[in-house]
Amino acid sequence: MSLIRTTVALACLLSAVALTGTAFAQTASVKVEGAWARATVQGQKGTGAFMKLTAPEGAKLVGASSPAAGVAEVHEMKMDGDVMKMRALPVLDLPAGKTVELKPGGYHIMLLDLKAPLAKDTTVPVTLTFKDAKGAESKQELNLPVATTAPGAAAAPAAADHQHGAHKH
């Protein structure tokens, strides 16, 4: 009888470990590299966060949040004729195995209604929300370094100096 109880207990333990491993795999399924947020000046109410995202199995970035901002949104900037336009995206596809770069002048996370300026050489917490191919949602918490340019970059890209303060949401 003792052997049966031990076997059942071991089976339950292994099942729990397997389930925990699956939950962790969902949370860690999107690789985040080079993440940072642009520093702000006094009175500036919005800024961008940038990074490279790679989902080995494919996923969608469906949202973002930060306690430092009243609103966090996934945005896209692109040229429409001679006009640079920006808009919020409900979903950003992350194709399997392909890196999607969130960068100044392209896709990025907008942090709006900032509660305080983001000072250079500090960090800002940001949580990204993903959905996998089966629709399962997961969150990934990040602490982004705050800088005036991308870490390791010599200078800010030309399109990086755009201001987001005039957006109406």
Image (tube, grey):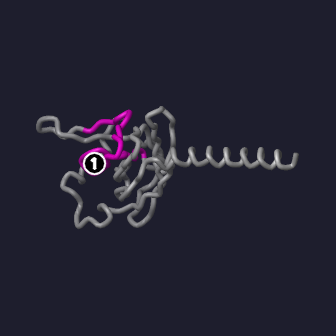
In-front residue for pair 71/145: 145
Q: Position of residue 36 (x, y in %)?
A: 37, 57
- Residue under numbered circle 1: 163
Would you say residue 6 sits in the magenta stretch? no
Q: Secondary structure at mark 1?
A: loop
**Three-letter residue code for mark 1:** Gln
Q: Which residues are magenta?
A: 86-113
Q: What is the x, y in percent for residue 76?
A: 29, 40
Question: Which residue is rendered at x = 41% and y = 42% of the image?
Answer: 57
The quadrant holding residue 119 is bottom left
Residue 31, compared with residue 92, is above or below; it is below
Q: Is residue 156 left or right of residue 130?
A: left
Q: Name the foreground residue: 9 vs 1.
A: 1
Q: Quadrant of the C terminus?
A: top left
- Give the camera-side residue of 19 and 132: 19
Which residue is farthest left? 82
Residue 117 seen in the figure? yes
- Examine the rendering and report whether any part of residue 41 can be seen: no
- Residue 54 image position (x, y, % from top left): 37, 49
Q: Residue at x 20, y 51 (%)?
A: 159
